[in-house]
Every structure is written in C-alpha cells, then in structure tokens.
Image (cartoon, rainbow, N blue to C red):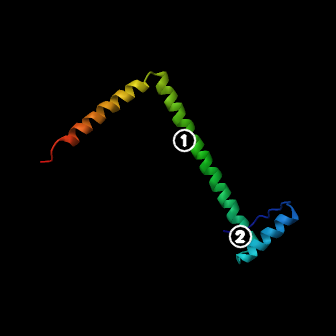
Amino acid sequence: MAKESVFTMKLEAELRDAFMAEAEASHRPASQVVRELMRDYVQRQREAREYDGFLRNKIAEARSQVAAGHYASAEDVEARFTAIKSQLNATSDEPAT
C-alpha cells in the first residue's frame, strides 16, 4: 500500500521517548507500529459499531414482538420447561433395549 499521507501529532516527550524505545526494542520502525495501532483501532471501532447496531436491531425486534403480544410469561416458560424436563426424565428411566 502506497504511503502518501503524513500524520503529525503532539504528545508528551516522555511518552514519545518510551514509545520510540519500545519500537526499537522490538526491531520495528515506529511508523509501522503506529500504523498497526491505527488499523487495530479502526477495526475495533467498526466491530463495536456493528455489534451496537446488531443489539439495537434485536431490541427493536423484541419490543415489536412484545407490542404484538408475541411473548410468553415467565410462568408459561417455567411450565414448558418443567414438562420437557419431565419427558426427558421419563425417557431416561426407561430400560435400554
């Protein structure tokens, strides 16, 4: 990828010195490390935005289902799972053939 832009920033001298020392210790140019950090940051932000959108859609869908009356009460859910549990217990008590 062609490098055609320059990015200038201000930071504390101590932070710059520590960063440059760590980049040198890892035998990598500081600019390469900064590019990697930037790519990671961009990727994390995109993923966070996508996940936020996913959650918003799921919440909107759930709210519309509740508004339409398409839901089960806690008691209904408990009753269904009690019935399923009873069926599973009954079939596991049967002797193997």
User: For this view, does 1 lie left or right of residue 72?
Assistant: right
Determine which quarter of the picture holds residue 37. Answer: bottom right
User: How many C-alpha atoms fall within 10 Å of the one at disc 1: few (<14), some, or many (≥20)?
Assistant: few
In this rendered view, identify the residue nearer to me: 43 or 91. Answer: 91
Determine which quarter of the picture holds residue 14. Answer: bottom right
Which residue corresponds to mark 1? Answer: 54
Q: Amino acid at mark 2?
A: Gln
How many tags in the picture?
Answer: 2
Q: Residue at x 75, y 66 (%)?
A: 4
Q: Residue at x 40, y 24 (%)?
A: 75
Assign the N terminus to one quadrant of the image: bottom right
> SS class of the residue under badge 2?
helix
In this rendered view, identify the residue nearer to me: 49 or 77. Answer: 77
Q: Residue at x 43, y 24 (%)?
A: 73
Residue 93 image point, x, y percent: 20, 41
Q: Which mark is residue 32?
A: 2
Q: Which mark is residue 76?
A: none
- Residue 91 seen in render: yes
Q: Indicate whether 97 appears above or below 59.
A: below
